[in-house]
Structures are given as C-alpha cells and as structure tokens.
Image: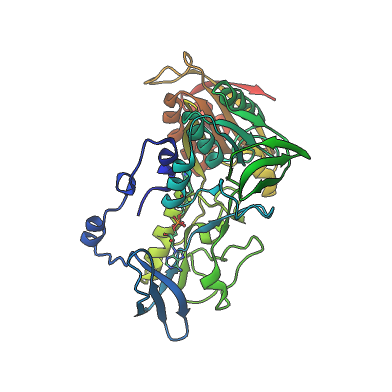
Amino acid sequence: MYSRPSLTAVISGEVSSVDQIHIFPSKFLRDAGVTVFPSYRVNEINFPNKIVHARSVGATGGNEQRHYGFNNIILATGSIPYVPKVGSDQLKGVFTIRKFREAKLLSEFSSEGLVAHVIGAGFVGLEVAEALAKRGIKVSLVVRSRILRLLVEEDLSERLTRRLEGHGVQARLGCCFEGVQGDRKVKAVIIDGQRHRSDMVVYATGVSPNVRLATETGIEVSTNGAITIDNRMQTSLKGVYTAGDCCETLDFVSECKTYRPIGSVAADEGKIAGVNAVEGAEESRGTIRQQYNKLFGTGVVSMGLSSEEAHSLGLKAKSFTMRVKSLQSEPFSLRKRENIMKMVVEQGSDRIIGWQSIGTREASFLSHYMFDCILNHRGISEVAESGLKFDLQVE
Ligand SMILES: Cc1cc2nc3c(=O)[nH]c(=O)nc-3n(C[C@H](O)[C@H](O)[C@H](O)COP(=O)(O)OP(=O)(O)OC[C@H]3O[C@@H](n4cnc5c(N)ncnc54)[C@H](O)[C@@H]3O)c2cc1C
C-alpha cells in the first residue's frame, strides 16, 4: 500500500522502488489486526448470500480462488483514469498515471531531449509536468480552460502559469486536444487542428469511479457515475458501505452531493464507513476539500470551495484578495514574503466558504485557522475581530 501522491517522485527519478513510498507496511497492518490478501482480485460479490469471490493475480499468479463470508462490507474500489477516446491506447509513448507500475514505465521511457504533451492541468497534470521537466524533457501542458480551474481563482491561476513557464513548461491554455498521430509510437499530437511533434503523451484528464462490483448487483449509482451514499456512507443496499474515489461525497459547505476523488476525502469517508460497518453510529456532516501541494517551488493551498466550484454547486460566491496586515502572534512574517491569498465568501451572507494561497509554505499555517472558519460558518467580520488584521481587496 503505497502513497499515490509520491508517484510523481518516481517519474522525476527521486524514487525508484515501491518500498520507498509504502505508507502501511504489512507488519503495521498485521499489528493493527488487519489481514491483507495483497494479490487477490475480487471478481464477484454475492450480496444475498454474503460471500466474496476472489482470484489470485500478479507475478505469483496461480489463479487460485478464495471465498470469504461477511456480515457487512465496504466497497472502496477507487477509480480508473479517464482517457480521451481518440484511439491512442495502443501507441507506445501514451501514459496514464495511477499505479506504481505506470509511473515506473513512464520514468523508464523518459529521457532528456524528448518532447512531451501532458493533457490536463489539475494537480496531477501539473506535478507530472514538473517531474518530466526535471528530467530534461520539453513539456507542453494542454489545458481546455486554465490551470487548476476548479481549485483556485483566475489570478492565482495566471500566476501559476507564469511560474511554470519560468520553469520551461509551455502552457497551452484554452486549447482543445484532438488526438495523437503515430504508427506504433507517438509522433505528434493534434491541438485545435494543428499538428505538433511529440514523443510522449500523458493523460491527466481525471478519473472515473470504479463501480463494476457495485453495479453488477444493482447497487445504485448517481448521475455522475459514482456509488450513491447516505450520511452513514451506506449504499442503496443495507449493510454495504462505501468510501473514497468509487463513491459520491457530501460537500460540507453546499450540502450537495458531488464527486471529489481526492485522498483526504477518501480518508474521512473511510473512517465513517469503517465505524458503521461494525455496527457503530457515525454520521457524516460532509467533507471540506483540503489540498496542499508544492508546485514549481511554490506552495499551493486550496480548501473549501473556489468561486467556480461554488457556482457549479448552486451557490453564489465572490472572492477577495486577502492581505494580512498583522497577526496577534506572528510566528511567520507573511508580509515580507510573496504570498497571495484569496478568500471565497458566499454572496448575501459574509460566510467564508473557501480559502486559497500561493506562495511560501508559511502561509499554510494560516490554513488551519481558515479551515476552522469554514467548518464553523464564520463570517469575515468574525475573522476581523479575532485579532487577525487583514486588508481585503474587493474585485
Ligand atoms: C499521481 C497522483 C497524485 C495524487 N496526489 C494526491 C494528493 O496530493 N492529495 C490527495 O488528497 N489526493 C491525491 N491523489 C488522489 C488520491 O490518491 C486518491 O483520491 C485516493 O488514493 C483514493 O483512495 P481510494 O482508497 O478511494 O482509492 P485507491 O487508492 O485507488 O484504492 C483502491 C484500491 O482498490 C483496489 N481494487 C479495486 N478493485 C478491486 C477488486 N476488484 N479486487 C481487489 N482490489 C480492488 C485497487 O487495486 C486499489 O488498491 C493523487 C492521485 C494520483 C494518481
């Protein structure tokens, strides 16, 4: 069980073995009372009779079958990379990045002087672009709209774009990726009808929930394709719980169900599903998105809702640039460094529903405070009264 966020370090060459990125070594799980069957794939779950049918896979193979009984069960089958349907699957030089094996293949293929196109500019696309650039590869990032569109406000997006261009990555914003050309291996990509020479293409175009085991038995999925949940993380079938990238999530701020395949959400949901699957009674109040990253040498924090995400969930929101004048106890000087912070506020009330920052890591200490504001429905005036003095630049 390894850390997926560390996969980009495999591409940059900083990590070469899966052992370096293990998060839960077997002994840790054993000591915690968890029995792991690492090389077994579940191919069927007989829900009426409460039996899981699994088959051995992997290098040791064996095709050995096992059957396990259960009382309650949690479906945490994750997601599958979304790949644009442009008929490029069989070409050498086309990659997705979800598993260690895929990151390793991409790393082995990478060498100085190659030309790569990374499609998609969420956190994963940006991290992959940075890792490839570190390997001396000429990288173009192909983006339908703008960088981190749902995660940061437009001016932060522009700032990040300038930053990655400063690191030699070309950003092709507002572009439509139309396909890949090549005979057995990638030779070019087509963007807005134009052909561009390329040796490799990496799809960072998001993921789809992996719901096969659920849908085969009629467990309900929502319109976004993810397993539906109630506030105890139970599916439409009693005693069957779910968590993570395979299911929808309840957004704390808007109280709407949405699809949000990120690790922090998966972990929060996993805890609730786990308690309820052993007959506990834990209810979810919804999750608040929290993402921290270091991209091209700068810290990026995004939590709660951005104004674009708020609109997509039916909330009216506006954003403000936030400049901190002074802090009651100022452990770090936020003013001396190049930080830009944005506060997202619900229109009509002054409730803080999101916060973002780009700059030095010091800004992230404020993020704990801002998270608390979102969680406790605080308004701007309450923040001002707290001793955190700041300027708000209204846009
Ligand atoms: C490169 C990369 C970087 C990322 N960085 C971040 C980050 O910085 N922060 C963040 O919050 N999130 C990040 N994510 C997203 C995060 O990794 C996922 O949201 C998280 O792993 C979801 O956890 P999960 O348990 O739902 O799914 P997964 O981690 O995908 O686990 C699902 C597991 O189920 C297994 N499985 C599926 N079907 C079967 C079956 N039939 N039988 C047996 N086993 C099965 C799979 O093999 C897998 O082990 C990143 C993802 C990637 C790819």
Residue 254 position within the rendered picture, expressed as x and y whole percent measured from the top left: 61, 50
On screen, residue 78 versus residue 184, left or right, reads left
Q: How many marks?
A: 0
> Is residue 239 visible in this depiction of the protein?
no
> Is residue 207 visible in this depiction of the protein?
yes
Residue 297 position within the rendered picture, expressed as x and y whole percent measured from the top left: 47, 25
Q: Nearer the viewer, residue 248 or 164?
A: 164
Residue 239 position within the rendered picture, expressed as x and y whole percent measured from the top left: 45, 75
View extreme (bottom): residue: 49
View extreme (right): residue: 193
On screen, residue 34 versus residue 65, left or right, reads left
267, above or below 61, in the image: above
- Quarter of the rendering containing residue 81: bottom right
242, above or below 166, in the image: below
Question: Coloured how?
Answer: rainbow
- Quarter of the rendering containing residue 351: top right
Split into 4 quadrants, where in the image is the N terminus?
bottom left
Instruction: Give the residue at x 56% y 40%.
Output: 125
Residue 159 position within the rendered picture, expressed as x and y whole percent measured from the top left: 60, 24
Split into 4 quadrants, where in the image is the C terminus?
top right
View extreme (top): residue: 336
View extreme (front): residue: 183
Q: Nearer the viewer, residue 191 or 48?
A: 191
54, above or below 83, in the image: below
147, above or below 165, in the image: below
Instruction: Give the residue at x 57% y 38%.
Output: 354
Q: Nearer the viewer, residue 160 or 14?
A: 14
- Quarter of the rendering containing residue 307: top right
